[in-house]
Amino acid sequence: MVFAPPNTDGSKVTLPSHLDNFIGGKWVPAQDGETFEDISPVDGKAFVTVARSKAADIDAAVQAGTDAKDAWGRTSTTERSNILLKIADRLESHLEELAVLECWENGKPVRETLAADLPLAIDHFRYFAGCVRAQEGGISEIDHDTMAYHFHEPLGVVGQIIPWNFPILMATWKLAPALAAGNCVVLKPAEQTPASILKVVELIADLLPDGVLNVVNGFGVEAGKPLASHDGISKIAFTGETTTGRLIMQYASQKIIPVTLELGGKSPNVFFGDVMAQDDAFLDKALEGFTMFALNQGEVCTCPSRALVQESIYDEFMEKAIARVEAITVGNPLDPNVMVGAQASNDQYEKILSYLDIGRQEGARVLTGGSKRTVDGLEGGFYIEPTVFEGDNSMRVFQEEIFGPVLSVTKFTDQEDALRIANDTLYGLGAGVWSRDTNTAYRMGRGIEAGRVWVNCYHQYPAHAAFGGYKQSGIGRENHKMMLDHYQQTKNLLVSYSPDKLGFF
Amino acid sequence: MTKPSVATRVELTDPAAELLARLERIHGALMFHQSGGCCDGSSPMCFPAGEFITSDADVLLGTLAPEGVTPIEFWMSRSQYEYWKHTHLTVDVVPGRGSGFSVEAPEGVRFLIRSRLMTQEELEAFDLL
């Protein structure tokens, strides 16, 4: 069954014609009344207008957070945990509705939002509900009469800037730990994908005290910058690209507040010769792992966009791998059988085409795909063929995050060569290693300079497995209880139980 | 597109030059920093001049001087330049939804880099052989 687009007969999703900001527990328009259009990449048409906010709206949201933070910070961990559990239940009972809306807004296949984005987001709230209940402070006995007590305290009001590639899941990765830790949040969704998050907020608004969660929509330069540089926030978290990441650190340095940054990568996916030792389930899994570059149309920070294949199996493996890529089902993203949908925006689509051009100019050989494509009935949408290039790691298609369904493949001779190529990149977010030999897999996994190395798997994002970057891929870790620390101060009380003076004066 | 009299690393298309003239009237003098990485990465970011602090970690690829516009410096991080230096860049503009804090987003357009391999003469001019 193909799902119906929002606001059409039989659709799971009904939207008003306009969506506002959520500040202090109320839905409010931008103070100057401006709006912008939210465009569906599935058909290239606007489907809702959204508040176009400026500095004054950010001020109001930070003030609402500031007014709420003392009371929220004093709630017990049990209360906050229970609220997160209720949020998870609420989202779960609206899973299909959210999945269809996110598909329509982002262009990703509903197959994926139903099976991954929403179930992971729901689980994430439950995970942090558990973590915060289990978190403990510390008591350190410095000497018999001197005790160091360590308490976790919330930071206050935190700013969070969310990317458009997994609108609900990326918001959840930041929201769940921040709320669990007792912070108030001012969140700015990406201007490409505000509606999915606003629908989540509509569903959970009654569960949170006013001002604890505030969502302000708009463009980066008009709303993101005033948030990142606001005097009233105690932390800024951002997922995006390197130049904006540097700019956010620059603003943070002027106020001396912490940042968490997740800035992407050019992740290597390494296939050793022994994957071909047998024609079995493992080889089948490895071939799916190769094809994972096309998941979410390649719009994943950890897209395995460089495949390194050992030369001893290269021809045989690539024949099977290309056949697997060519078996990808494309089409209407609302069809649950479709595996690859639309690119998220026109500029993203144009950028990918510019890379298909420079890839060819540099002499990379197109093994499959290489062009734009159209979907019947959705001619205005932004669709690209899953594409595999063969070339050299020095080429720009091997070095830059294209953020499209574009894979660049090269050969390696041995483990040392594989490690050299894998690490010849500015980034270090993800990597994959495929081998039947546990020693090879372990040595490679430890040797690759990346925060997440998938061994004999790829693109799994379970809560409780830390996720974050080495090198230019960012600072901090998400998806793990250690994230609570990123949203907390450490208070130390150093207490003397001795009646005796020190003797200095 | 204006034909350069000397070798350049970066140029503008006419629509990009016209957009920059419009943006200068709103934001004052401008600069570019080429981004890398996630989401909106690999895109040129346009900021009010001086907003983004450049340093020894960056390379000035060129200064763009469209007619009637304050000259615009185009920067890239030094590490990224090492992988890009054999290509010539042209800043173009396409309809789009914006990214990062780049100033053109509210206009419903996005700057985009188009690339070509440098010619032998250009490689010689920039000592890249």
Image (cartoon, rainbow, N blue to C red):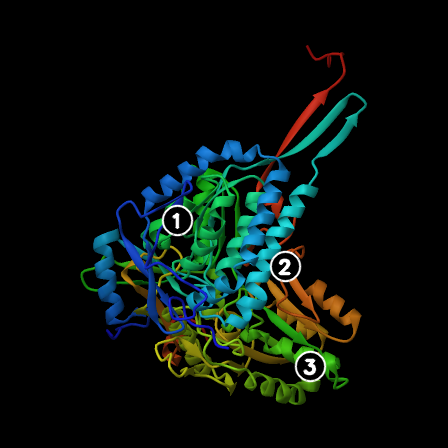
Q: Look at 33% across and 54% down and name the residue there.
A: B47
> Whole-Å distance between the Cαs marked 3 and 1?
45 Å
> Whole-Å distance between the Cαs marked 3 and 2?
26 Å
Residue pointed to by mark 3: A284
Q: Is residue A414 above or below residue A192?
A: below
Q: Is residue A257 above or below residue A411?
A: above
Mark found first going from the N terminus, 3 or 2: 3
> Whole-Å distance between the Cαs marked 1 and 2?
31 Å
Q: Is residue A87 above or below residue A230?
A: below
Which amino acid type corresponds to the residue marked 1 in the rendered image? Answer: Val
Q: Is residue A170 visible in the rendered structure shown here?
A: yes
Residue B11 numbered mark, or none: none
Residue A451 numbered mark, or none: 2
- Determine contact: label 3, label 2, CB under 8 Å: no
User: In front here: A226 or A392?
Assistant: A226
Classify 10 Å Cα crowding around label 2: few (below 14), some (14-19), many (20 and above).
many
Q: Is disc 2 on the same chain as disc 3? A: yes
Residue pointed to by mark 1: A216
Which chain letter matches label 1?
A
Which chain letter matches label 3?
A
